[in-house]
Image (cartoon, rainbow, N blue to C red):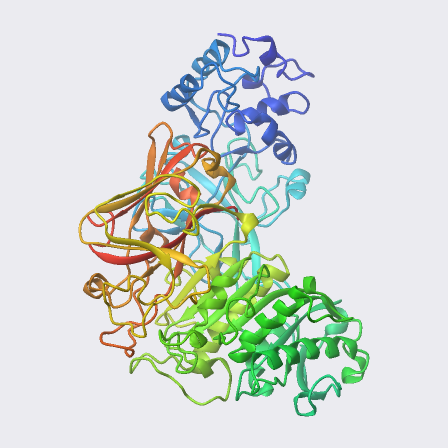
Amino acid sequence: MDRFPTPSMRLLQNPNTRETAPGGKLAHGGLLLWAAKRSCGGRALACAVALATFVPGARFATAGGCLGDVDSNGEVGGTDLAALLSAWGGTDSAADIDGSGLVDAADLTVLLGAWGRCPATAPVATELASIQATVAPYAIYLDSFNVGATVNLAVDPLKFPDLAGDVVDVYVVPNRTAAEWSASSALIDVRGASQTVALPANPTTPNIALTMTGVTGGNGLSPGRGFDLVVDANRDGVLGDGDLIDGAGDEPGFWYVVDLAAAGPLAVSQIASYDVNDPDILDTMELERIYYPTSIATLGVRPLVVISHGNGHNYAWYDYLGNHLASWGYVVMSHQNDTVPGIETASTTTLEHTESFLAQLATIGGGVLNGRVDGDVIVWIGHSRGGEGIARGYDRLFDGTFTSPNYQIGDIRLLISIAPTDFLGTASANPHGVPFMLMYGAADGDVCGCPDSDIADSFNILERAEGLRQSTYVHGADHNDFNCCGFNDFAGPTGTAIGNAEAQDVMKAASLAMIRRVVENDSSAEEYLWRQYESLRPISVASTTTVINEWIAAPADRIVLDNFQTNTSTTVSSSGGAVTLVGVANEVEGLQNDNNTAFTWVTTDPMNGATRGRTTDLTRAFVLNWTIASSINWTVPPDRRDFTQGKFLSMRAAQGTRHPQTIALLGDLTYTVTLIDELGEETSLQISALGGGVEEPYQRTGFGTGTGWQNAMETIRLPLSAFTSGGSAIDLTRIASVLVQFGGTSGSAQGRLVIDDLQIEKK
């Protein structure tokens, strides 16, 4: 049968050899369009440019796809036929196999002629680096691993049946860019030799531990060292036809990350006390302590980090953080802060000290920093009143009520607030669209997160932030654990205090990861900011320390399915899709504000424990509970059904404090997420596959009867690649609904859950 039955298909022959694509070698020219259709399920125009960059002797294919493989699962079969027939007579680009502009008999002929498994005629770009899961799909493809931890290789035998059981050579190669792979396809293993393994044929045991003895992490000022992972199927030592590669593009297949809480590679110098002598700052508030890399003259210009202490604190109490960040290449200035009058004066000292420091670089330390500080890249870190002060300072720049000749609002790249107060409220303590990070200790006896005072509710500021947001919530840490010398205000249960050394390790690691991610566009440590701590934690942080991560992507990087801000009925999502509830009870959408002064559970306060917004704030969420098998089904609007635009399906969730269903469980809460496409194909993932569940509330008492503190939201971020494992035929370009199931075989038998921000995240 002619594989190119129409004139338009014959144009895809190699113009040089006139060989048709299935029988000929991949080559330049017209064949690129054919390769793009093979690798991208018919989306030739969208993929041709990307494929053209991958030419190490042969182009890369994707994990599935060939001519006729409409759903790009690596096989031409019944689901492709069904998709083509459902698009008959239309212009769907995926089903228009011959590129004629119409789905018709010519496309059907091509599809039937290509029936069966797609041949591998190029290296296949696919995810390989994984962590082990105890439930399907048994391997979760992720990017960051601690040095010394197990790095797994997983080749799904249902996705790659031709390789199941084969003996192959596995190479760990220092990361190459696409251009470098184009220049050379030779495989040189960083370990000195490749690792020979037999690929499993059992889909429930796909993980193979890589031998990483002697391999180091870190790369200069980056805590992560990138590697590409290659399965050399024919064992010829060259990346070629039919081989698999994780890291075909510029980003590595995986990162090997050193201890984020340990000192970086640079020696640090300190100016213990410098007086800016600025008439715009009170005479009693003019001192600074400065930390910088001793070798700064060899580093070029470096970003500036400013630390603003809290009320009753001291600018010299942050040596642990200043020395840490300086050892990783940053210039850090900690200043006296005028906090006693209030937040407005605290913001003024932050604004003015930043200005004075930049203005006096020629004289500070004899000019050692002159020409070495990048005034266009500034990070503000504030603690307590200083933590609110930096948000207020940014708001003043935003409103134009403060201007500086030395820096502009765009130069403030990141705010990090440690247990900030919220005296000023919605309009003034506001980070707007700048990336914002919150560090908070659940045992804080000062800024306590209590239900009787908005001033003590740090998460109000996080919820107001409109850009990239992250919070790190630390069980057993108190307010002054995040400095050296404040009094002990621990207010948690006996035996749960972690102490300031441990809390500071969490702070050092998280702040470094966030600064690297936002300021340096370094993704090597990003997963430490959103993965379950049970799965990934900095090396120095004890396995007994409970930390909850919350991550909300920037608006440009998310496609919202339901954020509960509009369409406030429980049966309609904010994106306009129908929401169907089965078996759940006491479902309410509302403002995340505990409406009385106690954490005691009462039915008249469905948002009990929600200390995340004032009545003037806009943050809303959805609460429900269950004791039987139950579900929520979100219908996805047609304009948001292409989930291939994203990398993760994300949801924020928390257990409702002191609720009877929470008390009865008192452990991690789990549930199952199922994607269903327009043809009814579905695939499921239980969130425990990522290593944990939704953490139970910190078991702190006070403010009424019972045990349990504020609702601690965390992000459950599911890689979309996990939904295509195990031979799934799901079409991620046509997802019709997202189903979340509770109880029965789907997860925890009962629970009280707070849900917010169901969305697709692009990176």
Q: Residue at x 35, y 47 (%)?
A: 569
Is residue 263 left or right of 651 when viewed as pictured? right
Frontmost residue, 312 versus 464: 464
Q: Position of residue 152 (x, y in %)?
A: 42, 51
Residue 172, horizontal then vertical, whole percent: 53, 49
Q: Residue at left 58%, top 68%?
A: 415
Along the viewing direction, whichever of 553 and 167 lies nearer the viewer: 553
Asked if residue 241 shows in the view, the reply is yes
Q: Quadrant of residue 698?
A: bottom left
Quadrant in the rendering for residue 9: top right
Is 371 positioned to the left or the right of 46 in the image?
right
Q: Residue most toward the front?
A: 616
Indicate whether 704 appears above or below 71. below
Identify whether 218 is placed above or below 728. below
As displayed, is residue 268 above or below residue 23?
A: below
Name the side, left or right, on which 92 lies relative to 219.
left
From the top left corner, tell me how far across and down residue 595 is, in percent.
33, 68
Q: How many marks?
A: 0
Residue at the spot x=46%, y=83% of the render? 480
- Is residue 93 positioned above or below 356 on the image? above
Residue 79 position in % (x across, y down): 38, 24
Q: Nearer the viewer, residue 318 or 167?
A: 318
Front-most of residues 607 and 633: 607
On the question of residue 259 being in view, the answer is: no
